[in-house]
Image (spheres, rainbow, N blue to C red):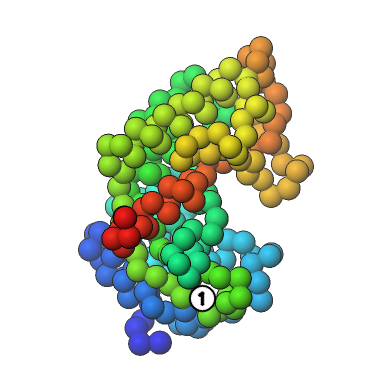
Amino acid sequence: MTFEIAPEYTPQSEEELMERANALAGHTLGELACALGLAVPASLRRHKGWVGQLIETCLGAMATNRPVPDFENLGIELKTLPVDRFGQPRETTYLCTVDLSEVEELQWESSRARKKLARVLFIPILAEPDIDLGARMVGSPILWSPNDAQEQALRRDWQEHMDLIAQGLVETITARDGRYLQIRPKAANAHVMTWGVDDRGDAVMTTPRGFYLRTSFTGELLRAHFGLI
C-alpha cells in the first residue's frame, strides 16, 4: 500500500472525506483489507455486508444503526455500488428500512429515505463474478445530491408506496412498483417479523421491508457523472 488508513478518524469536511475516498480509488479490496489488518473472506455468501463495512472503516464512517447518514456530522450517506466492467450497476442499492407503523404521520421531507438521499457518497466497486473478492478494484467516488427532477421522481415513488402501506395494502406492493425507488422484503430470514397495519387499520405482524434504489437510477447517475450521457 502506498497510503495509510486512519479508520479511527472521522473526516470533518466534505473535502477531507473526498480526499480519503479518492485515495482509495484504484486499489483492490484485498489491499484495503491488508492495510487494516483484516482477512478477506472467500466469498460474500456468508459475509454480504463485508464490502460496505470495509469501505466504511477505510473512510472513518460512524457506522451506526440509527436512521441517520453514515457521516452524521456531514449529513452524507455512504453507498457502495457493485458494477460490471462496463460501469453498469450489478444490483439494486439498499437505502433504508420502511417504517410500517404510524405511516400516516410521515412526510417525505422528514422521512428516513429523504434524509439518506439528501447527500450520498457512491463508491463504485468493480465486481464481476469472475474476479476474486480481494482483487476487486475500487473506483472513483461520486458525491451526489438529487436535482429537482430526481427529487420529484423519488418523492413520487415514496409517496405512492407509503399511501398503499397506510391503506393496509403493503402485501400488494411488489418489486415492480416504483420508477426509481422500490420496496422489497428486508430480513435475515423468513422468521423475522415486524408490526404493520392491515386494511382495517388493525396492527398485524408482517415481513420487514426496505427501500432500494433501482439499477436504472444508479446507472443514470454513473453515466451522467462520467460523461457517458
Camera-side residue of 46 and 88: 88
Q: Where the C terminus falls, by quadrant? A: bottom left
- x%, y% of residue 183? 56, 38
Q: Is residue 228 visible?
A: yes
Camera-side residue of 70 and 18: 18
- x%, y% of residue 151? 33, 37
Q: Is residue 75 visible?
A: no
Question: Is 217 placed above or below 181 here?
Answer: below
Mark 1 Cα shell of 10 Å, populated few (<14), some (14-19), many (≥20): many
Which residue: 27% across, 42% down?
147
Instruction: Farthest residue to the bottom: give it.
Output: 2
- x%, y% of residue 55? 45, 67
SS of the residue under disc 1 = loop
* Left or right of 65, for residue 111: left
Residue located beneath label 1 in the image: 136
Question: Is 213 placed above or below 47 here?
Answer: above
Camera-side residue of 223 and 133: 223
Question: Label 1 sits on what residue type?
Answer: Arg
Numbered marks: total: 1
Which residue: 75% across, 43% down?
190
Residue 207 placement: quadrant: top right
Which residue: 36% across, 53% down?
221
* Left or right of 74, for residue 160: right
Instruction: Farthest residue to the front: give it.
Output: 229
Instruction: Farthest residue to the right: give it.
Output: 191
Which residue: 32% across, 75% down?
23
Residue 228 placement: quadrant: bottom left
- x%, y% of residue 101? 57, 26
Q: Where the N terminus falls, by quadrant? A: bottom left
